[in-house]
Amino acid sequence: MDRMSEARGGWFSRLFRRRAPERNADGRHIRRVIEAYSACLAKTARERPHRPERDLPYTKEEIGRAILVALKYATTHEAAEPLHQAFVDLERFLSDDEWRLVDEYERLAAVGGLAGAMSEPRRAAAVDLLAEVEARRGRRFELLAILDREAKRDGDQASNR
């Protein structure tokens, strides 16, 4: 496990140990979802960051919703940053078709075998897909920035009352 994975996993646990999101079953479920996802992220190799979506312990949507709820309770940058990164990293989990293409590309690239082993149209499709994944990750970062601005604005308005 690399240091980033350890940091992500550790922060999820500490976030909920200090302050549970809710005192009901939904709060416990959110914690279970995030802890399971954190364990999944810990298994991701740095040199091969993409994985099949079927490796996720819950759906992308359920994990994303759980992270967004947890972010409401993350009162410091130190607590929120790993959640932000985990939310964005959901896009690195690919459908089966996407995964097969990216896996082939990354395996061949790792050993320098792209030139003859992968057809040009397939290689181009893999490059395009990886660019699309990065664009989707960027949109997730933008969403988080919007939510952060709204939360700050709401907090400023509440303190002015």
Image: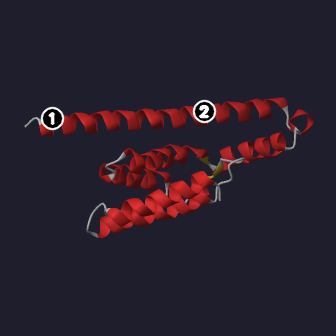
Considering every residue shown, the one lying at the far right of the view is 116
Image location (x, y in percent) of residue 6: 57, 58
Looking at the image, is mark 1 or mark 2 nearer the viewer?
Answer: 1
Q: Is residue 103 above or below residue 5?
A: above
Q: Badge 2, how many Cα within 10 Å: few under 14, some, many 20+?
A: few
Q: Residue at x 55, y 63 (%)?
A: 39
Left or right of 132 on screen, residue 145? left
Name which of mark 1 and mark 2 comes first in the sequence: 2
Left or right of 132 on screen, residue 157? left
Judging by the rendered image, the residue that carries numbered circle 2 is: 132
Q: Is residue 108 visible?
A: yes
Q: Secondary structure at mark 1?
A: helix
Identify which residue, 147 or 124, lies in the foreground: 147
Q: Which mark is on residue 18?
A: none
Q: Residue at x 31, y 33 (%)?
A: 149
Q: Residue at x 33, y 38 (%)?
A: 147
Judging by the rendered image, the residue that carries numbered circle 1 is: 157
Amino acid at the residue labelled 2: Glu
Among the 4 quarters of the image, the one containing residue 161:
top left
Image location (x, y in percent) of residue 48: 71, 48
Q: Is residue 50 above or below residue 33?
A: above
